[in-house]
Amino acid sequence: MIDITVLELKSITEDLKNAILLDIKDVKKANHESLINRNSVKLTLMETLIKVKQELNEQLASEYKDGKDISIYKEGIDELETQLRELHALNGKLASIVLPVKEMYKEIIDEISQKNGGTLVEVMA
């Protein structure tokens, strides 16, 4: 059962990594629609990842409590940890691309607002 849960976690992690790679491509192309459409899929994957990770922890704790040797799962869990580290690094790469763009837009909006007396849109009567 633990092996199946580890495989499920690896699959979810791989799906998230692929989604982030697509996000990076779409950010570079300014393909905002694809980014927005993919957000709900990524959110579902992250929620599932958290749930399944908790299940894995419970399964491991149960096996350990029953006196079973859980070191037999070490290789699979180490591979999962490597994938999670790769996911974290990819997420950081995406953030390093998105955050400067966000800051640029903020500066443009602030500048326009300042020129219009504190509002983004100037209404002429």
Image (cartoon, rainbow, N blue to C red):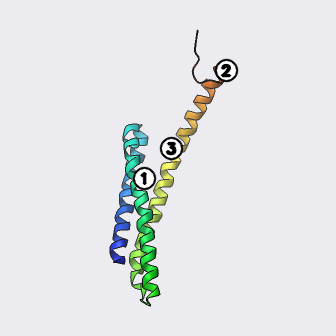
Q: Is residue 23 visible?
A: yes
Is residue 9 shown above or below 37?
below
Evaluate whether residue 78 shows in this view: no
Can you tell which mark lies on residue 117?
A: 2
Q: Gap in Å between the C-alphas at discs 3 and 1?
A: 18 Å
Q: Residue at x 49, y 58 (%)?
A: 89
Q: Which residue is mark 3?
A: 98
The x, y position of residue 96, in whole percent, is 53, 48
Q: CA distance from mark 3 to mark 2?
A: 29 Å
Instruction: Kindly state the secondary structure of the residue where label 2 is placed.
Output: loop
Q: Report crowding for label 3: few under 14, some 14 to 19, many 20 or more residues within 10 A (C-alpha).
A: some
Q: Residue beneath label 1, please?
A: 43
In the rendering, at what x and y percent does residue 12 appear? Answer: 37, 62
User: Which residue is depicted at the point 42% across and 75% down?
Assistant: 77
Work out whether mark 2 precedes mark 1 in sequence or the reverse, and give the earlier one: 1
Amino acid type at circle 2 is Gly
**Does residue 11 sit above or below 26 in this rendering?**
below
Query: How far from the left and from the top, in percent, is residue 6?
Result: 37, 72
Q: Secondary structure at mark 3?
A: helix
Q: Amino acid at mark 1?
A: Leu
